[in-house]
């Protein structure tokens, strides 16, 4: 019996007409298949040999490039920002010191500078003027009586030497003269009192300074209980009453410098803390730092202002705003560790200035901090850091 076996050159199974195959042909087929499989495996290893040789290079090619900075430390002034109002440093209320009456003339207005003792307003004194004139006449009468008593005494002294007047008469005339002189002093004292009372009808400045308010008008009837007619700033000195928390107040001391900026202007005025509140408001838990300011027409009492106070120096890393991130857990930055992996680092920020933001807790200044693109990183991400020069 004849057998015909056809071997497919592409590696397919042998074709037969249904009769049994020759064992030798079967072995050849297995040998050829093995050679083809070995060739395929060799090609696969050849194509993938580069991947196993440099796995790190592939990972680095996929790592994100980030800019980092080593901030170091910087000594910067520690500042406190507060708000408050402008006021006169020593406000002087001026009212009626005398009996009062009707105002006949007001000589100053708000905004005027005055000297100590300068008349601010005049109260009608027609009645007082008549009383002064009457008392002046009484002084003249008393003085005339004193002169007459002195003349009588002088004549008696000449006659006593001749024995025409007794020693008792001389003593009586001497007493009369002394009483007349005393009446002159009393009359003059009464005249001085009336003059002083009339002078007190003038409302005068108790010291030099700036008139802040005026509440007096001609025709107004005033009395000692009428209240404040003028208010003044002694020597024009101003202050800002800055409201601070207990913690910030404890960080300040008298003499601390401050920059005060009134609302509505960008101009800053230099001043110094001259008094710290000895008490804390029980409701707001705040105290007041009083900042002394020199006079300027831009400083209006009652106006609102903000102040930046210096409370010492701190040494801390400075970072730009782009490096500091925040979420519901607080502020943080990304630092790059020795394996070039991103690590989240919680931080506490402090002073903010044009140079950057001070990090008072969380950094030593020697770390590599991600400068930008921190929002696209996750903890543990592999990166390629580029240090900013």
Image (cartoon, rainbow, N blue to C red):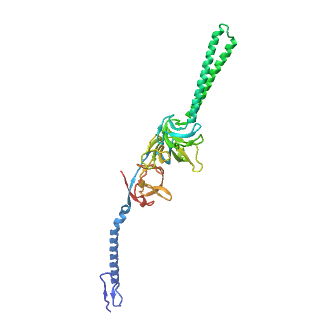
Q: Using the image, determine if residue 124 lies above or below residue 378.
A: above
Q: Using the image, determine if residue 181 lies above or below residue 372.
A: above
Q: Residue furthest bottom?
A: 1
Q: Using the image, determine if residue 361 lies above or below residue 232.
A: below
In x, y percent, where is residue 227? 57, 42
Q: With 364 as the anchor, is 41 left or right in this view?
A: left
Q: With 364 as the anchor, is 179 left or right in this view?
A: right
Q: Nearer the viewer, residue 147 or 345?
A: 147
In x, y percent, where is residue 184? 61, 23
Count of marks placed on residues:
0
Q: Residue furthest left?
A: 9
Decide if residue 95 is in sight here. Answer: no
Decide if residue 185 is in sight here. Answer: yes
Q: Nearer the viewer, residue 210 or 365?
A: 210
Q: Nearer the viewer, residue 7 or 291?
A: 291
Residue located 47% across and 46% down the image = 307
Quarter of image, res 136: top right
Q: Using the image, determine if residue 349 lies above or below residue 105.
A: below
In x, y percent, where is residue 222? 57, 41
In x, y percent, where is residue 383? 40, 59
Residue located 63% across and 22% down the image = 182
Q: Nearer the viewer, residue 179 or 244?
A: 179
Q: Residue furthest front?
A: 164
């Amino acid at each position: 019996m004849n057998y015909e076996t056809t071997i497919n050159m592409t590696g397919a199974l042998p074709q037969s007409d249904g009769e049994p195959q020759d064992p030798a042909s079967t072995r050849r087929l297995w040998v050829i298949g093995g050679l083809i499989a070995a060739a395929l495996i060799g090609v696969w290893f050849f194509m993938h040999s580069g991947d196993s040789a440099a796995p790190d290079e592939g990972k680095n090619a996929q790592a994100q490039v980030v800019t980092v900075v080593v901030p170091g430390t910087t000594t910067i002034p520690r500042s406190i920002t507060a708000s408050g109002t402008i006021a006169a440093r020593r406000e002087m209320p001026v009212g009626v010191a005398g009996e009062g009456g009707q105002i006949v003339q007001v000589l100053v207005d708000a905004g005027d500078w005055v000297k100590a003792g300068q008349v601010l307003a005049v109260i009608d004194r027609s009645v007082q003027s008549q009383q002064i004139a009457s008392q002046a006449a009484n002084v003249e009468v008393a003085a005339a009586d004193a002169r007459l008593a002195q003349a009588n005494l002088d004549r008696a002294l000449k006659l006593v030497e001749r024995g025409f007047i007794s020693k008792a008469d001389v003593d009586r005339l001497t007493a009369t003269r002394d009483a007349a002189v005393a009446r002159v002093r009393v009359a003059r004292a009464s005249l001085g009192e009336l003059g002083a009372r009339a002078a007190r009808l003038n409302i005068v400045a108790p010291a030099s300074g700036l008139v802040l308010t005026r509440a007096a008008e001609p025709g107004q009837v005033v009395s000692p209980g009428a209240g404040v007619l003028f208010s003044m700033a002694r020597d024009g000195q101003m202050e800002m009453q800055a409201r601070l928390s207990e913690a910030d107040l404890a960080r300040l001391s008298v003499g601390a410098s401050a920059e005060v900026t009134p609302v509505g202007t960008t101009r800053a005025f230099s001043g110094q803390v001259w008094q710290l509140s000895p008490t804390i408001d029980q409701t707001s838990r705040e105290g007041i730092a009083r900042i002394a300011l020199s006079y300027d027409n831009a400083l209006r009492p009652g106006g609102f202002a903000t102040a930046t106070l210096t409370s010492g120096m701190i040494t801390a890393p400075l970072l730009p705003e782009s490096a500091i991130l925040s979420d519901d857990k607080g502020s943080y930055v990304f630092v790059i560790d020795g394996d070039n992996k991103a690590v989240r680092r919680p931080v506490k920020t402090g002073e903010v200035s044009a140079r950057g933001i001070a990090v008072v807790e969380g950094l030593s200044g020697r770390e590599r901090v991600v400068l930008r693109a921190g929002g696209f990183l996750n903890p543990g991400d592999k990166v390629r850091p580029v240090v900013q020069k």
